Amino acid sequence: MKQKWISILLCVAMCATLAVGCEGKAKGESEGKSDSKTEKTVEIKNEGDPIVIATMTDEESQIYGELMKQILEANGYEVEASGIGTYNNSTLPRQSLMEKQVDLVQDYTGRGMMFIKDVDTSAYQTDLETAFNTTREADEKNGLVWMCYSPYNNTDGICVRKEWAEKNHIKDFNDFAKYINDGGEMKLAVATENSYFVTEPICLPGWEEKYGFKLNENQVVVGVSDPQTMVANGTDGVIASNCYTTGGTLEALDLYVIEDPEYVSPIYSPSAVCTEDFLKEYPEIQEILTPMYEAIDEDTIRDMNKRLSTDGESAADIASGFLKEKGFIK
């Protein structure tokens, strides 16, 4: 009899357990369904007609390409981004835009000096806003729209070791000129692909004329593969090299960019460029991109460039981290 009651009690307990389990499962399923209903999804605004983005191959352009791609996708736009980091010279993005092969590119304000007929070239040696507006206004007749820009200047420059600059009290080209004119030792290395650096009036010849110094042919070596590493290591007596002023290797190699207070080398602020037709179709794109561009200053891009060029991070991860940190995407 006792055994029978035990069996009955066990059956009751098992039924109770099953009932609780079923109730819990049903409750969990119900909650799951409720979560899925409240989960927000971004509505695709241009399904089947993606926005085509393309950029040049340099590290900075790759990062900006990813930034544009991710912020547009987060705002509900389908994007075709296989063209990011594919253009190997500065004429191709502009040509592709004008031929309607792409919708959105990354470019630099100073390019207006080269590509826009009858543009006021002197306006690129004043300030960031003037340089941007000069390009924007001059390019309207070509059907291109310069939507926004980042508040820094990535132009040609000369870099030296920070320790050397501090030791010789060199901050800008006025100090550099005094050092040279006082007989200071100098050897400048220039990368093979940047040979224009020693002939163009917006680079070395311009600095020599504006600040009043002159390097002789024995002080300039053109045609090396990695001049900045030569500076960092003091290879073959190299003290200085050409550079882009926000290059990723500068911080990694502990190099200092000599300041150019007269803006001899034109201002190159990164800008988002599209066609007039594209902006008419998607006017809100300018409102999406402008705050993002304006949030990137010189220190920020130098760090991002360094992480891409020397730390091994991907452009996609760098862009994602920045956009989340600044609250542009979740």
Image (cartoon, rainbow, N blue to C red):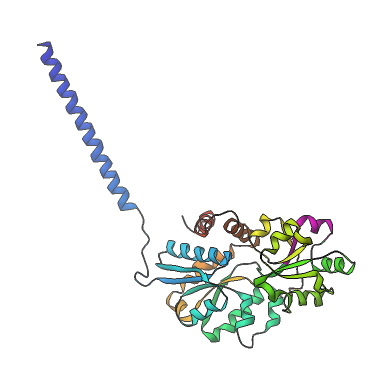
Query: Residue 306, relative to residue 51: is it above or below?
Result: above
Residue at screen point 73% across, 78% down: 199
Query: Residue 121, relative to residue 233: is it above or below?
Result: below
Q: Is residue 249 left or right of residue 330?
A: right
Numbered circles on residues, count: 0
Q: Nearer the viewer, residue 323 or 209?
A: 209
Q: Is residue 302 left or right of residue 84?
A: right
Q: Quadrant of residue 305?
A: bottom right
Rendering coords of residue 128 (x, y %): 66, 72
Query: Residue 89, relative to residue 116: is it above or below?
Result: above
Residue at screen point 51% across, 66% down: 65
Q: Is residue 158 left or right of residue 143?
A: right
Rendering coords of residue 105 (x, y %): 51, 73
In the image as oriented, which residue stretches furthest toward the top?
A: 2
> Is residue 308 a member of the stretch shown in magenta?
no
> Could one spot residue 137 in this view of the protein?
yes
In the image as oriented, which residue stretches furthest toward the right?
A: 182
Q: Nearer the viewer, residue 255 or 6?
A: 255
Q: Quadrant of residue 57?
A: bottom right
Residue stretch rendered in magenta on the structure: 158-169
Q: Quadrant of residue 161?
A: bottom right
Q: Nearer the viewer, residue 63 or 284?
A: 63
Query: Residue 35, relative to residue 2: is it above or below?
Result: below
> Is residue 165 a member of the stretch shown in magenta?
yes
> Could one spot residue 266 in this view of the protein?
no
In the image as oriented, which residue stretches furthest toward the front?
A: 236
In the image as oriented, which residue stretches furthest toward the bottom?
A: 118
Rendering coords of residue 134 (x, y %): 63, 80
Of the 4 image quadrants, the one containing the N terminus is top left
Rendering coords of residue 227 (x, y %): 70, 64
Residue at screen point 84% across, 69% down: 177
